[in-house]
């Protein structure tokens, strides 16, 4: 790629290729793991949306952990060789929520995602130029999505969709007195950890530690049943998704799901490449064509493996980059340790059983905090745009359509072809595509035309 890297004075204590002791790898790797609360939260949200049995939701958590760990290992140790962590994508989860509401089976959703990653791999990886003489498809995609009025809209609408799912979990607690007390304790614990600690394990693990505190409170209040944790084995290996979830795969369901899932998967890949540049700049490492090609190969292969065992498509987690900037520990082998820890946790079904056993009110309270922070991140990105009338209209129209589409009666979409319907109904896909098109029309095309006249 022709993208130039700005040279910056690095603040890292440990650089990308530095070697540490095994115990340091494990300690810092565990610290990075604690930041990845979404690898525990998003599978629960998907399980509730698709009305999966508790056993399948437990397995989904297991598969997501293993898939995230495998992709993190591939990227940090073998292919990309950068200090990054991979986890389940928020945009694909949001699209999944929409598809579940349309009655698409979870297995059909997974097949649509597998087809998407294969097609994206075929379309993108071979066409990355071997020299910096011309731009690749992925660079053009980055141009379309990276401006604050577009990317900020994407993150904001994802936050809104996932907050709605978290509130749904909260509602499942039926607001009884004991569930309200457990919920309040969870929120208080999380906020206390966030406000008191600025870095370290207690700060990075504030959500997960708060969840554990909420779980302990729930058990003490008599509203948490640990029978699943006791009955589940201490070790289990993953199996292909069609064995675990059943062969409830519909060609029509795949057709309905495909376009929305494809667009969401393309977002994940494009976001990931953007993170590569951010991470590379921390240690003045040039992100060249060869590294991008290897990174995309890791994204595709890792996502495919994750989907095959019943997990979800993965992407590079920006929150881990934020943690890296705080800890200043940039050694990529730390993230290899994180990948190993993720796989190890995924091989222990009792972990998933414990999470599923936590009362919905406690889970919902914690998840609302996670995705409210994501929403604020989106708004902060939007605030960085140039506040012209054009940009304000882009954000206003995109968010209005994304937020309002769920209020449109279903019969309005009945005449729309089934393969387009899910993409139009999905708030995340609709808002992002509208933002990209509007930005292209009012900003990028006039800018390119003006440049070519010179």
Image: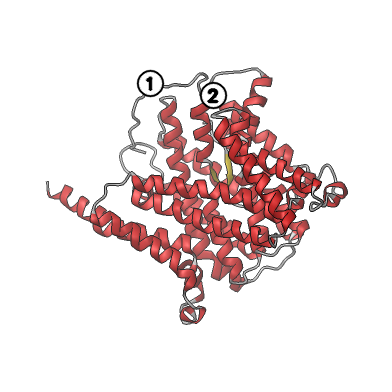
Q: Residue at x 34, y 46 (%)?
A: 383
Q: Which residue is mark 1?
A: 9
Q: Residue at x 64, y 63 (%)?
A: 49
Q: In the image, is 382 to the left or to the right of 324? A: left
Q: Is residue 231 visible?
A: yes
User: Along the line of sight, which residue is nearer the eye, 419 or 44?
Assistant: 44
Label 1 crowd bin: few (<14), some (14–19), many (20+), radius 10 Å? few
Farthest residue to the left: give it.
454
Q: Are marks 1 and 2 in contact (CB under 8 Å)?
A: no
Q: Between disc 1 and disc 2, whose residue precedes?
A: 1
Q: In the image, is 205 to the left or to the right of 407? A: right
In the picture, the disc for residue 24 is none
Q: In the image, is 283 to the left or to the right of 3? A: right
Q: Residue at x 50, y 38 (%)?
A: 294
Position of 293 relative to 173 (above/below):
above
Of helix, strand and loop, which one carries label 1? loop
Of helix, strand and loop, which one carries label 2? loop
Farthest residue to the front: give it.
177
Q: Is residue 70 visible?
A: no
Position of 439 relative to 213 (above/below):
below
User: Along the line of sight, which residue is nearer the eye, 218 or 160?
Assistant: 218
Q: Position of residue 443 (x, y in %)?
A: 25, 54
Q: Which residue is mark 2?
A: 329
Q: Which quarter of the rendering shows the N terminus?
A: top left
Q: Residue at x 40, y 45 (%)?
A: 380
């Amino acid at each position: 790629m022709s993208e130039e890297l700005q040279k910056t004075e690095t603040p890292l204590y440990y650089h990308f290729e530095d070697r540490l002791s095994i115990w340091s790898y494990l300690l810092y790797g565990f610290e990075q793991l604690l930041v990845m609360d979404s690898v525990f939260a998003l599978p629960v949200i998907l399980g509730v949306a698709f009305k999966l049995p508790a056993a399948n939701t437990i397995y989904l958590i297991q598969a997501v952990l293993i898939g995230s760990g495998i992709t993190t290992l591939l990227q940090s140790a073998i292919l990309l060789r950068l200090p990054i962590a991979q986890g389940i994508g928020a945009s694909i989860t949001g699209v999944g929520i929409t598809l579940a509401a349309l009655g698409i089976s979870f297995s059909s959703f997974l097949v649509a995602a597998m087809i998407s990653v294969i097609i994206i791999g075929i379309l993108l990886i071979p066409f990355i130029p071997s020299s910096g003489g011309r731009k690749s498809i992925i660079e053009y995609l980055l141009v379309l999505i990276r401006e604050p009025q577009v990317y900020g809209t994407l993150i904001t609408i994802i936050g809104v969709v996932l907050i709605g799912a978290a509130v749904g979990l909260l509602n499942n607690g039926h607001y009884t007195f004991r569930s309200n007390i457990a919920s309040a304790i969870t929120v208080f614990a999380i906020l206390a950890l966030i406000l008191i600690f600025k870095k370290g394990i207690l700060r990075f693990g504030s959500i997960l530690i708060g969840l554990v505190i909420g779980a302990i409170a729930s058990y003490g209040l008599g509203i948490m049943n640990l029978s699943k944790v006791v009955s589940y084995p201490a070790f289990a290996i993953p199996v292909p998704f069609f064995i675990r979830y059943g062969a409830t795969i519909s060609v029509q369901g795949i057709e309905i799901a495909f376009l929305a899932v494809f667009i969401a998967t393309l977002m994940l890949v494009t976001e990931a490449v953007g993170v590569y540049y951010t991470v590379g700049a921390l240690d003045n490492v040039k992100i060249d064509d060869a590294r991008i090609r290897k990174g995309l190969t890791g994204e595709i292969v890792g996502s495919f493996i994750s989907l095959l065992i019943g997990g979800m498509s993965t992407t590079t987690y920006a929150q881990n980059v934020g943690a890296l900037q705080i800890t200043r520990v940039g050694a990529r082998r730390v993230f290899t340790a994180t990948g190993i820890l993720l796989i190890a946790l995924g091989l222990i079904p009792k972990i998933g059983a414990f999470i599923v056993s936590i009362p919905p009110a406690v889970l919902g309270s914690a998840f609302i905090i996670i995705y409210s922070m994501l929403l604020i991140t989106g708004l902060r990105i939007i605030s960085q745009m140039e506040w012209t009338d054009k940009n304000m209209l882009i954000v206003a129209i995109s968010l209005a359509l994304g937020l309002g589409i769920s209020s449109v009666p279903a019969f309005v979409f009945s005449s729309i072809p089934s393969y387009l319907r899910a993409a139009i109904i999905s708030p995340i896909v609709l808002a992002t595509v509208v933002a990209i098109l509007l930005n292209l029309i009012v900003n990028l095309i006039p800018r390119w035309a003006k440049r070519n006249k010179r």
